[in-house]
């Protein structure tokens, strides 16, 4: 199920939490929200889940409109909020049977759905334990299981890996990737590497607006910082090599990293490697390293949010 968000706007006491944003999430795709606290991620997700009404704009789930068929849309959605609401005194399997009834799953399907969720979320050894006795990682697994129990077409996960250790994050990531093969998955995270590893599309929000979106590769191509080289040149003193590099056209910035190691930022579309090679040939220097510096998602995130 494709989800199309158009000009979505939401204000609280004259402050816009979401400011006329538009984007599309596709079936079989994992879309990741990134943004600082207060960027509007959670508000957007709550509107998509039907928990808040927007001031303006619309969301369509295939042919269903948020304004016209909100009750039908909720049946297509599985939602895990940032603060996972669970009944700690219930054991895992009883809780999932309880959620199945709330979701009006036909009786003949309930047992199979519960067992499927226990398998998918790795809860077999925990299914008879009280939820309050579980580690946070397993409680998050239970939360994902309740979001998926009715086999929704759209899954919305708000900060699903917050507070988890690396092993727990790996387990949750594996679950998300598995469900993302067939469903439309939208998740938020403060862990940049998690978004980069898990998501097909990335959307960066700041002050209620979308300030960058695309795949991580597309975001890197749009960033000036992508055009950067690490160069190690031997054969002379560092200041001499530095001054010579500064004479090259199209060099925007040079930083001395360590002795004769330099990081060069340059204009796109130029053959900077050829210029460096000719410079070294002219001075009888040699190049011991020449490698592109790949832009990190963290660098892109800081760049697009620092002025918003």
Image (cartoon, grey):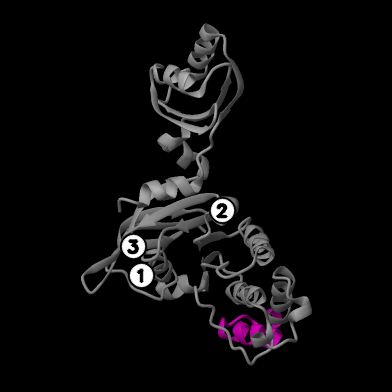
Label disc, if present, on residue 169 of the rendered structure: none
Image location (x, y in percent) of residue 173: 64, 60
Above or below for 97 versus 261: below
Which numbered disc, 2 or 1, marks the residue that appears first in the sequence? 1
Distance (Cα) linking label 2 and label 3: 31 Å
Region in magenta:
92-109
Q: Callout 1: 10 Å neighbours few (<14), some, many (20+)?
A: few
**Residue 139: x and y, percent?**
63, 78
Q: Residue furthest left?
A: 14
Res 205 quadrant in image: bottom left
Residue 29 in sight from this viewpoint: no
Q: Reading the chain from its start, which is encountered first: label 2 or label 3?
A: 3
Front-most of residues 136 and 230: 230
Q: Which mark is residue 193?
A: 2
- What SS does tag 2 mark? helix
Q: Picture coordinates of residue 44 (x, y %)?
A: 39, 65
Magenta part mainly helix, strand or loop?
helix
Examine the rendering and report whether any part of residue 157 can be seen.
Answer: yes
Give the number of the disc on residue 58: 3
Q: Which mark is residue 68?
A: 1
Horizontal arrangement in the rendering, residue 16 relative to residue 95 (left or right): left
Q: Above or below — where is 151 with respect to 285? A: below
Residue 268 part of the magenta-drawn span: no
């Amino acid at each position: 199920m494709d989800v199309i968000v158009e000009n979505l706007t939401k204000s609280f006491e004259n402050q816009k939490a979401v400011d006329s944003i538009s984007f599309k999430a596709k079936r079989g795709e994992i879309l990741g929200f990134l943004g600082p606290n207060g960027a509007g991620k959670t508000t957007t997700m709550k509107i998509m889940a039907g928990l808040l009404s927007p001031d303006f704009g619309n969301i369509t789930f295939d042919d269903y409109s948020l304004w016209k068929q909100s009750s039908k849309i909720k049946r297509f959605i599985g939602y895990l909020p940032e603060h996972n609401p669970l009944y700690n005194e219930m054991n895992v399997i009883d809780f999932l049977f309880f959620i199945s009834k709330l979701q009006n799953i036909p009786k003949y399907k309930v047992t199979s759905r519960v067992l499927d969720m226990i398998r998918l979320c790795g809860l077999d050894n925990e299914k008879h334990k009280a939820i309050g006795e579980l580690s946070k990682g397993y409680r998050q697994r239970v939360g994902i299981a309740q979001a998926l129990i009715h086999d929704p077409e759209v899954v919305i996960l708000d900060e699903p890996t917050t507070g988890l250790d690396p092993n727990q994050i790996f387990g949750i990531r594996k679950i998300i990737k598995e469900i993302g093969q067939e469903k439309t998955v939208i998740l938020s995270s403060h862990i940049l590497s998690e978004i980069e590893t898990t998501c097909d599309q990335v959307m960066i929000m700041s002050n209620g607006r979308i300030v960058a979106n695309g795949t991580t590769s597309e975001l890197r191509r749009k960033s000036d910082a992508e055009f950067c080289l690490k160069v190690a040149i031997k054969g002379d003193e560092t200041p001499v090599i530095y001054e010579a590099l500064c004479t090259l056209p199209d060099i925007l910035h040079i930083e001395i990293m360590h002795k004769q190691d330099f990081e060069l930022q340059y204009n796109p579309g130029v053959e900077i490697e050829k210029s460096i090679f000719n410079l070294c040939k002219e001075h009888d220097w040699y190049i011991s390293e020449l490698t592109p510096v790949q832009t990190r998602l963290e660098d892109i995130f800081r760049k697009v949010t620092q002025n918003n």
